[in-house]
Amino acid sequence: MSAEVEHYTRLAQENLHKKNYEDAINNFSEALSCAQKSHDTEAICKCKLNFGAALVALGRTSEGLKYLESVKPREQDHQLNGDVFYNLCLAHEDLNNAVEASECIQRAIKHYSTDDVLLKADCTCRLASLYIKLQEFEKAADEYTNAASSYGTANDVPQQAACLLQQAQLLQRCNKSDDAVKAADKCVKLCTELSELPNVGIGKYTELKKVLY
């Protein structure tokens, strides 16, 4: 990125931190203008992503969605593609387009590196929650199973237990009582282990904010 693009992006980050939201939006817009003047394709993509994601986060979802849909990274830029589809998911979810949101998050998962286990686990949780909105409860249970496995690999035991609890509840709802009991037993076992550690408990799923390059 050019020095100007980096300057305005940094200002935007600082203003977001200070909750100066309108100033942040203006900074992102300036960064995009500078990137377009430089004809740097990658910088343009990243600035459009930042601008669109910020608009969505600040409630200007329809406007932000237009910018996000205009971002066309190269197919081999997997991280950038993943971030674009992740934010498209957030926009569609905010507009109550659960089908489109689920399709976007699945594409994000495919692009994100298998090395980033926590990121893929968080995305899988979001996919599960979208399946719940679509009343596809068995699919949701399967995704919580996948997420629990990933959190286990990452040694994030609180999140693993939280996913197992969600899985058990969904399996019970699908009249799969035996499988629900197995998932619940795993959750109880993990919670028992956690209770023996100081200052550790079941964590709350924290939404990712894939913005700000």
Image (cartoon, rainbow, N blue to C red):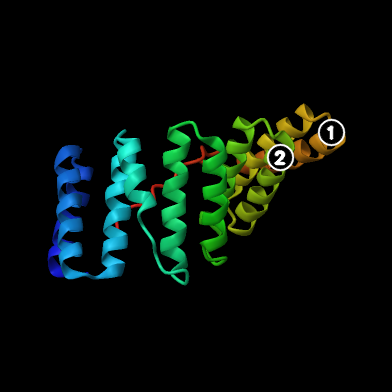
On the question of residue 120 being in view, the answer is no
Q: Is residue 180 left or right of residue 141?
A: right
Q: Secondary structure at mark 2?
A: helix
Q: Secondary structure at mark 1?
A: loop
**Against 10, is 142 above or below?**
above
* Residue 77 picture location, percent across and down: 43, 69
On the question of residue 146 being in view, the answer is yes
Q: Residues within 10 Å of mark 1 (few under 14, many from 20)?
A: some
Q: Is residue 104 left or right of residue 8?
A: right
> Which is more toward the observer, 156 or 130?
130
Q: Is the C-beta separation of discs 2 and 1 under 8 Å?
A: yes
Residue 82's label in the rendered image is: none
* Residue 199 picture location, percent across and down: 50, 40
Q: Which residue corresponds to mark 1?
A: 176
Residue 141's label in the rendered image is: 2
At a point 42% along the width and 69% down the height, the residue shown is 74
The residue type indicated by label 1 comes to Lys
Q: CA distance from mark 2 to mark 1?
A: 11 Å
Q: Residues within 10 Å of mark 2 (few under 14, many from 20)?
A: many
At a point 57% along the width and 39% down the height, the residue shown is 99
Could you say which quadrant of the image residue 186 lies in? Answer: top right
- As drawn, the residue found furthest toward the right would be 178
Could you say which quadrant of the image residue 164 lies in? Answer: top right
Q: Tell how many labels.
A: 2
* Residue 82 picture location, percent across and down: 47, 58
